[in-house]
Amino acid sequence: MTTTTPDPTGLTPADPWADPGLPADERVEALLARLTLQEKVAQLSSTWEDVEPAGPDVAPGTSLFDRVGDLDVTARHGLGQLTRPYGTVPRPALEHARLLAERQRQIMAQSRFRIPAMAHDECLTGFTAYGATIYPTSLGMAATFDPALIRRVGAAIGADLAAAGVHQGLAPVVDVIRDYRWGRCEESFGEDPYLVGEMGEAYVRGVQSAGVYATLKHFAGYSVSMGGRRELYDVILPPFERLVAAGVGSVMNSYAEIDGEAPAASRWLLTGVLREQWGFEGTVVSDYWSLPFLVNAHRVAADLPAAGALALTAGLDVELPDQRGFGAALVDAVRRGEADEADVDRAVRRVLRQKVALGLLDPDWDPEPPALRAGALDLDKPENRELAHAVARSSAVLLSNDGVLPLPSRGRIALIGPCADDVRTMFGCYSFPNHVLSDRDDLGNGVEAVSLRTALAAELPGVEWEFMPGCPVREEDRSGIPAAARASAAADLTVLVVGDKPGMFGIGTSGEGCDVEDLRLPGVQEELVEAVLATGRPVVLVVNSGRPYAVGRFAHAAAAMVQVFLPGEEGGRAVAELLSGAANFSGKLPVQIPASPAGQPYTYLHPPLGDRQSWLSNLDPTPAFPFGHGLSYTVFEIGHLTVDREQVPTDGRFGVRVRVRNTGEVPGAETVQLYFTDPVAQVTRPVRALLAFAKVELEPGEQATVRFDVHTDRLAFTGLEGHRIVEPGEILLYAGSSSGDTPAEAKVELVGAVRDLTAVRQHGVPVSVERE
């Protein structure tokens, strides 16, 4: 008779949890039944081995928290997650991979059942690792209005994470922008919930196609300083709901509070809405140190054991980045009867189910990342750079142009501004250089990137360029402004590049923890703009920023205006190609450009009372450039909006057709935008809201018909009783090139009873393009 010798750790080939041939739930239950309380709680905890409290804050309060302990202590009963193995310190990628493999071996050796940890890292503008491709910010990605392109970005990022042995990426941010003063505007996909949902779903599907879990951030209400439940249901929650329906693997709580309730401790939000209403089956992970914040920021828990019990009961599964409210504190809370072990089991099931899906419990799982086994880990491959270039080029928005663009190939051009020759002004706050290396200029950027100054000189070698920074991005140093004005006056024209330099927690002018009081350009840049415009010479004003600044007051004086949203490592080359005319602009604004630094309402989703037609205020909130705006070097004509039926049941669908034609002389791409208005409803509704969109490339003289297949779910809103409904009545439809330019109009009537929409069946609007 043959007997099986058990592994010293307790794992044998016969263990059911290690059998890939068994159903996942059966494997999970078999392992769960063998775990002690300490081992269970360990699966809900994480550890941050590389955190450097002495360096710049890379998460809120990093410098305030000491390390919990070394891995032999934090993983003595196993471990749920390893925090940011690549995204905390600058090392060569393969060295990170070797260190990750060593840590995984140690974790498995200390676990009775050899359970590896999941590794997570940031990936908002690309894998946040030294030497990894830096893509445009999310706001820049949204400006492409091209979900297919952003899905490719997500897939490329996911592939890099997978090769590096990372199982979960902490992105995307699907908070809908409600106030442009918020520092994290650059991390969002814009101010419209449908656009945010479209781009967010594309990104998630791309990342998860590589076998890596994406993480929705931040659930919910983070972008709303003040707001009501109706705003929450109709604006803030829809992108999260849509991405849950798309199968996202993880959700991260918000630091915000909703009617005094902290999301990390909200059973209504994390269980009632997320799981019971939407059917989410993945894991809920805490934003970093959310559990300690329940004690010292929200003050809804007296101590860490109480915070852990509150969060666990609410539905939070994994504490990041370490183990303060979970870990030993949660074990103590369970033993004192303050937390239920059944809730621990529920969370552990979710964690183990994902580890099974990732293959981490398979007997042949290798702690060495695939790239380490292959002996190479290139995180900035040529194909990644090409993709970053395509996104950067597609994201730049031409706001205005009196004919000065494209730039001439000869003559004398002054290039002025603090963002013209500093490549880090093109990177988002979650790029590795701005996120980690803000105090390490000696290490460079880790990737090859050229400034707009260098790129323009290469693109237009026949031009005589004169460069003057004029002023810093942030500091109030006016000494260079007179010289910049003189250079502008002596030139044939000027390219003036102003905007942001992102960073974290006050280090930058945009990014996490970098809010602003109003929407004036940082530092003394507005004085620089005024001085240059006062010369009377033609000026191309390029704004490179993480939020929309109120530059509308310069529109009448600037010969042309361009908006770019931190375009990444290929931003210099891409913007130079667009300014020279080697490529055509096609970006559209995912946010409005305000005319006034303090004008309200900020976003275009406002009710009639806040519109310019209101008689209740002497202030005009009309933006300088509306949501969806963006010009081109060619001209497009949008018209012939038709609906395939006049009446539609409140539980039905209808088809919309719109014709678009390139009437100019060069190829280009136009984004056909479909908006709707609900003129009479039981609650106030937005003046106009995006219903769907389609980006169409057309040759000169070519035309196409865009068909939108609209389900009435897209017309739902939260009624007086607090339920989401579809209400009978007239709906007005508009099509055009922006929310402020919609020459084509039609209407449709919804008929039948008010429909209580308990579950959305159609989040997106299928689109087809017929070329003629």
Image (tube, rainbow, N blue to C red):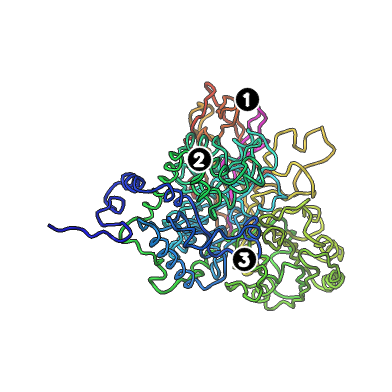
Does residue 508 lie above or below 681 as drawn?
below
What amino acid does circle 2 point to? Answer: Arg
Is 740 situated left or right of 599 in this image? left
Circles 3 and 2: CB atoms closer than 8 Å: no
User: What segment carries the magenta color?
Assistant: 668-693
Q: Nearer the viewer, mark 3 or mark 2?
A: 2
Q: Which residue is mark 3?
A: 436
Q: Which residue is mark 2?
A: 336
Which percent across, then down, holds residue 48?
53, 60
| Disc 3/disc 2 C-alpha distance (Å) | 41 Å
- Dot label at residue 521: none
Pick whichever, 537 or 636, lies toward us: 537
What amino acid does circle 3 point to? Answer: Val
Q: Residue at x 55, y 70 (%)?
A: 131
Q: Residues within 10 Å of mark 2 (few under 14, many from 20)?
A: few
Q: Which residue is mark 1?
A: 720
**Is residue 669 part of the magenta span, yes or no?**
yes
